[in-house]
Image (cartoon, grey):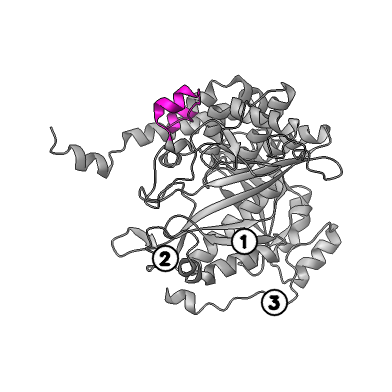
């Protein structure tokens, strides 16, 4: 960890890292004042991984007018063939941000277009289409997304272990030493986010050795997704510079808790009031009738929704019933909701909803688009989620859970993809072409996984028969 000890990075006092409501001329002045040489024109692929072209700052206006062209066939999930039109990213000036961890660089996101029209397979466009449905009703979905991650170093034999090799407690959650000994990384990431105007309000050591979480204030759904991408960029690059690996893999080690990405959410009206909150709620959870119907929509589409929130083979090593070495699990597999119940897929903090299924490998645009679609379906059909389940599901036997008529989430990517493929609702809400593309990619991943022979299989069966 010597590389951590010599890091003296700090923001310049008074530096402002994100322009607000700037016109083009002011944006150019802002970039000049901050010595920006290149602007990354940026979008994400179907997996939520950032893709970019580096554009000299003198051509900022081109990004905003003509757009920046990409060969769509070279990117996962755009469903564009090599002979078809370019994928053009037309920048949105309001997304212009400096990158404090990459001096001289800024980034801008925007609308992905093909032949001058928003591309329906672009997951940021899919989210914007769902938020537009909310806007028609005078609503905004505010989300606070909680990314968990693992901070590793690679050992001589090629394996990975926690960056802090003294982080070895059996129950390390909230441990001071585990937090303090990687503080240089955590401080630098936090200060980068703060410089971008992202309000970080707490940082903690999570339940596994080498696992952390940085929480920042809620925003509207599109901005929240944009912020998650910025966070992942910052964390990955800062870790790399410090000789570490910042992993968002859902379940990096079988003996450790997985990396979740919980979504706290509420709907706000035109005045900014939380319309999920109703202090007269007799249950004591502070939810409005609208919030209950939104929750019911999530539960009604839970299995297909899981494919979009837990989108990898590895995700389902996290979504299993059982206990971890530290004594509990934070990845609920039960289709239920409850008052502050972390063993149900939907937890109710007072006056809002927390969806706990998603992991840090999810595409935040796609996950939130699916969340909005499912919740609105619950509202439109006036669904009832039934009574809250305020019990520890992990203390019940499978028979006791079945007797309560509580369903279980898919236990493999294959099962989840089948549920999504058979969902006429999501095919209609998110687009049949997109669902077909997503299912195709994930079917290939599932088949490829099944062709792989693991070390576990070799150890168990090599001389068994």
Q: Position of residue 194 (x, y in %)?
A: 68, 65
The span from disc 2 to disc 1 (Cα, nearest Å) is: 21 Å
**Quadrant where the C terminus is found in the figure:** top left
Tell whether label 1 touches label 2 (CB within 8 Å). no
Residue at 68 percent of width and 49 percent of height: 224
Q: In x, y percent, where is residue 357?
A: 54, 39
Whole-percent x and y of residue 426?
Answer: 62, 26
**Element at badge 2?**
loop
- Mark in front: 3 vs 2: 2
Crowding at mark 2 (Cα within 10 Å: few <14, some 14-19, many 20+): many
Q: Which residues are magenta?
A: 396-416
User: In whole angstroms, how far apart are the C-alphas of marks 3 and 1?
Assistant: 23 Å
Q: Image point 44% across, 38% down: which residue?
A: 394
Q: Looking at the rendered structure, which numbered label has been put on residue 202?
A: 1
Whether residue 115 appears in this view of the structure is no
Q: Residues within 10 Å of mark 3 (few under 14, many from 20)?
A: few
Q: Do the residues bearing badges 3 and 1 touch, measured as CB atoms within 8 Å?
A: no
Circle nearer the viewer, 3 or 1: 1
- Drawn side of residue 73 relative to residue 68, left or right: left
Q: Determine which residue is flagged by label 3.
A: 12
For the residues marked 3 and 2, what is the alpha-carbon distance in whole angstroms?
28 Å
Q: Earlier in the sequence, mark 3 or mark 2?
A: 3
Asked which secondary structure carries label 1, the reply is strand
Percent x, y for residue 159?
33, 58
Q: Where, by quadrant of the figure, is residue 277 drawn?
A: top right
Q: Nearer the viewer, residue 422 or 263?
A: 263
Question: Residue 126 lies in magenta, yes or no?
Answer: no
Where is mark 2, residue-wise? 163
Q: Is residue 307 found left or right of 268 in the rendered image?
A: left
N-term-proximal mark, 3 vs 1: 3
Residue 459 location, quadrant? top left
């Amino acid at each position: 960890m010597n590389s951590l000890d010599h890091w003296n990075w700090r923001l310049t006092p008074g530096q402002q890292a994100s322009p607000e409501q700037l016109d083009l001329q002011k944006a150019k002045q802002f970039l000049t004042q901050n010595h920006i040489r290149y602007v990354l024109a940026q979008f994400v692929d179907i997996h939520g991984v950032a893709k970019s072209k580096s554009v000299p700052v003198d051509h900022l206006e081109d990004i905003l007018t003509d757009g920046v062209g990409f060969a769509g066939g070279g990117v996962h999930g755009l469903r564009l063939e090599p002979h078809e039109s370019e994928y053009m990213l037309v920048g949105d000036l309001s997304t212009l941000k400096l990158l404090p961890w990459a001096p001289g660089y800024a980034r801008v996101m925007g609308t992905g277009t093909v032949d001058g029209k928003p591309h329906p397979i672009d997951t940021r466009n899919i989210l914007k289409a769902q938020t537009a449905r909310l806007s028609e009703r005078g609503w905004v979905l505010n989300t606070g997304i909680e990314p968990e991650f693992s901070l590793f170093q690679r050992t001589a034999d090629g394996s990975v272990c926690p960056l802090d090799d003294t982080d070895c407690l059996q129950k390390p959650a909230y441990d001071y030493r585990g937090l303090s000994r990687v503080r240089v990384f955590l401080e630098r990431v936090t200060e980068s986010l703060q410089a971008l105007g992202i309000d970080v309000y707490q940082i903690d050591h999570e339940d596994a050795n080498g696992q952390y979480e940085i929480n920042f204030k809620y925003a509207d759904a599109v901005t929240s997704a944009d912020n998650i991408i910025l966070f992942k960029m910052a964390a990955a690059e800062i870790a790399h510079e410090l000789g570490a690996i910042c992993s968002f893999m859902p379940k990096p080690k079988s003996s450790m808790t997985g990396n979740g990405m919980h979504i706290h959410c509420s709907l706000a009206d035109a005045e900014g009031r939380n319309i999920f909150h109703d202090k007269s709620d007799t249950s004591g959870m502070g939810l409005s009738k609208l919030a209950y119907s939104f929750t019911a929509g999530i539960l009604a589409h839970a299995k297909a929704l899981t494919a979009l929130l837990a989108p990898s083979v590895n995700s389902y090593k996290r979504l299993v019933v059982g206990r971890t070495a530290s004594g509990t699990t934070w990845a609920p597999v039960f289709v239920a909701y409850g008052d502050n119940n972390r063993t149900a897929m939907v937890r109710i903090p007072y006056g809002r909803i927390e969806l706990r299924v998603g992991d840090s490998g999810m595409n935040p645009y796609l996950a939130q688009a699916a969340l909005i679609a499912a919740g609105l379906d619950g509202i439109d059909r006036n669904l009832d989620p039934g009574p809250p389940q305020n019990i520890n599901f992990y203390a019940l036997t499978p028979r006791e859970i079945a007797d309560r008529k509580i369903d279980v989430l898919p236990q493999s990517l294959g099962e989840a993809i089948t549920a999504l493929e058979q969902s006429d609702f999501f095919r209609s809400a998110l687009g049949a072409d997109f669902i077909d593309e997503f299912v195709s990619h994930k079917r290939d991943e599932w088949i490829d996984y099944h062709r792989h022979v693991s070390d576990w299989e070799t150890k168990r069966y090599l001389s068994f028969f």
